Image (cartoon, coloured by chain):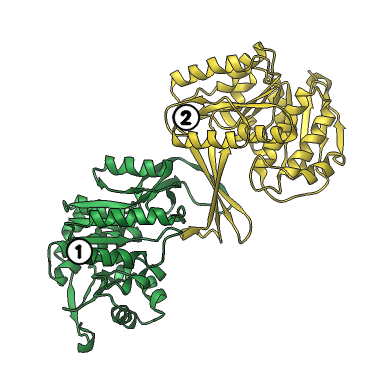
Chain colours: A green, B yellow
Amino acid sequence: MILTVTLNAALDVTYNVDALVPHGSHRVDESFSRAGGKGVNVARVLSALGVPAVVTGLVGGPTGRAIRDDLGAAQLVDELVPMAGDSRRTVTVVSREDGDATVFNQAGPHVDEATWADFLTRFTQLVRGVQVVVLAGSLPPGLPTDAYARLTRLAAAAGAMTVVDAGGPALLAALGARPTVVKPNAAELAEATGHADPEAAVASLRARGAVCVVASHGPEGLHAVTPAGAWRAVPPLRLAGNPTGAGDACVAAIAAGLLAAALWPAILREAVALSAAAVPCPLAGDFDAGVHEQFRTSVPVEGVPVPTDELR
Amino acid sequence: MILTVTLNAALDVTYNVDALVPHGSHRVDESFSRAGGKGVNVARVLSALGVPAVVTGLVGGPTGRAIRDDLGAAQLVDELVPMAGDSRRTVTVVSREDGDATVFNQAGPHVDEATWADFLTRFTQLVRGVQVVVLAGSLPPGLPTDAYARLTRLAAAAGAMTVVDAGGPALLAALGARPTVVKPNAAELAEATGHADPEAAVASLRARGAVCVVASHGPEGLHAVTPAGAWRAVPPLRLAGNPTGAGDACVAAIAAGLLAAALWPAILREAVALSAAAVPCPLAGDFDAGVHEQFRTSVPVEGVPVPTDELR
């Protein structure tokens, strides 16, 4: 079983407009909303792959009710914990002219100490019998920066592996709890470590406690360094589209691979194929089954030499 | 008493961002929401002026509840009629860089025939004892184009005057019911009549049934043609800011003037002053009391000759 944690769950709203005109007034012809936040998107991908996943995190208010209604409609297992305040929305404005997306992310409501204590209690119950925990996305205001570190330790105490997909202080604070995998993208990698060189940045994250690092470099694919070795996996074709969806699909593939005790080259091949299959889909959490089938057998994965002192 | 009708009531949400970057991802640092839709904004201005106003229209779903909660908080009299579906939101993205606003308007939920029949029944009750009815804003999907014509006739049958602030087919269809005042802006005037010349366009709206036309030309002020004469009123200073708020303030001044049986030059002076006072306020329904006080005595209003055959 995989448990995905979305502490800043959102209602993702898509607005379709003819073209985005800054300082203009736009008629939104079609709008569409569904439950989102990185952990929810990861659970959606896992569910489509037939991998059992449970969604937890924090929700509140009428927007929280809309999130839960949508999870129910999608038949995702909802173990979200209620909080005061109204859950955030993200608004994505998609222009028909060029298909491009402009995204507005609210910070989310403030979480108080009592709610965080409730969540820790519920998480401790939920993590029993779980093999992999996914900790994904931004932390809402009010939570301590080491929230993911705390959850990583609780997961480890229950015998579960962890995949952390976060940036900035939340990522750095998580490292001390020795998460099984962290999956920064290129920007998060540089920002968190201060290293312009991606290889030095990955080594730095491992030196600070991450057991495995899977760095995603968009169309240039994945670079993974683990105690068992290091690899690069590159998509055979470049696809234009939705990078958020690609990141969430990558995390889903890593979590599913850890659950199945797959070997790293197989995990990375699947992660690249599933990411590539998510890129053409405008909504994070969706992927193109045809692209996935086609790519999963054709992604080249190459071993990369690693200094022996880094193989730990 | 003034009754304002907002058939497509909205929750107006403001997102503050550092700068709007098309195709970028934005962190929304602050967001703010309140009840909106043109009729609601007009009632808010009237309430601030101490003129009694009642809000009616259609609302539904969790967004409808948020609209009603906000009307209650603002101590506006809420006689909204419930409908199925969730009320629309408008999102205004305000850039800190230049203060400019980019607006996204949803069409609103589909209104079925039974809901429209409910509304007509409720409106017929509410309009008794009302002197002025304001019909403002777009019609939601599902309503007949002649919705404002229907309400104008019901208002006239109850002895009430009407102010219609709409564009396109809703405006044209209303004319046949002989509304007391229509208040198109320059773009609505040209679009509805097909006349590039504003004077010919105003004459055309009156020929089709509008008793009075108050055409708003932004910083160039108002041009009014009525059975009692024609005038131009021009703001003494140009102000940059929020044109939606200016239009709603103008309608509020016209409605308050009709209620007080004021003479047209006085109504227009007040309409220009109140519009100018709304321009510096980012939210429609607000106005700057200082600017209002300063301008209401200094707006020049000039009579304009009108061909005798148009004075009817």
Q: Is residue B140 above or below residue B235?
A: above
User: The C terminus of chain B appears in which quarter of the rendering?
Assistant: top right
Q: Out of B280 and A163, give the one closest to the viewer.
A: A163
Q: Is residue B151 above or below residue B47?
A: above
User: The N terminus of chain B appears in which quarter of the rendering?
Assistant: top right
Q: Residue at x 67, y 36 (%)?
A: B248
Q: Out of A155 and A20, give the one closest to the viewer.
A: A155
Q: Position of residue A137 (x, y in %)?
A: 36, 60
Q: Is residue B50 above or below residue A13?
A: above
Write down the quadrant of residue A102 in the picture.
Answer: bottom left
Q: Which amino acid does the dot numbered 1 rest on?
A: Ala
Q: Position of residue A12 (x, y in %)?
A: 39, 49
Residue A170 numbered mark, or none: none
Residue that badge 1 annotates: A160
Judge left or right: residue B22 versus residue B212: left
Residue A3 visible to an observer of this rendering: yes
Q: Which amino acid does the dot numbered 2 rest on?
A: Pro
Residue that badge 2 annotates: B141
Residue B107 visible to an observer of this rendering: no
Q: Secondary structure at mark 1?
A: loop
Residue at mark 1 to residue at mark 2: CA–CA distance: 51 Å
Chain assignment, label 2: B
Q: Position of residue B165 (x, y in %)?
A: 64, 30
Q: Out of A152 and A66, give the one closest to the viewer.
A: A152
Write down the quadrant of residue B295 in the picture.
Answer: top right
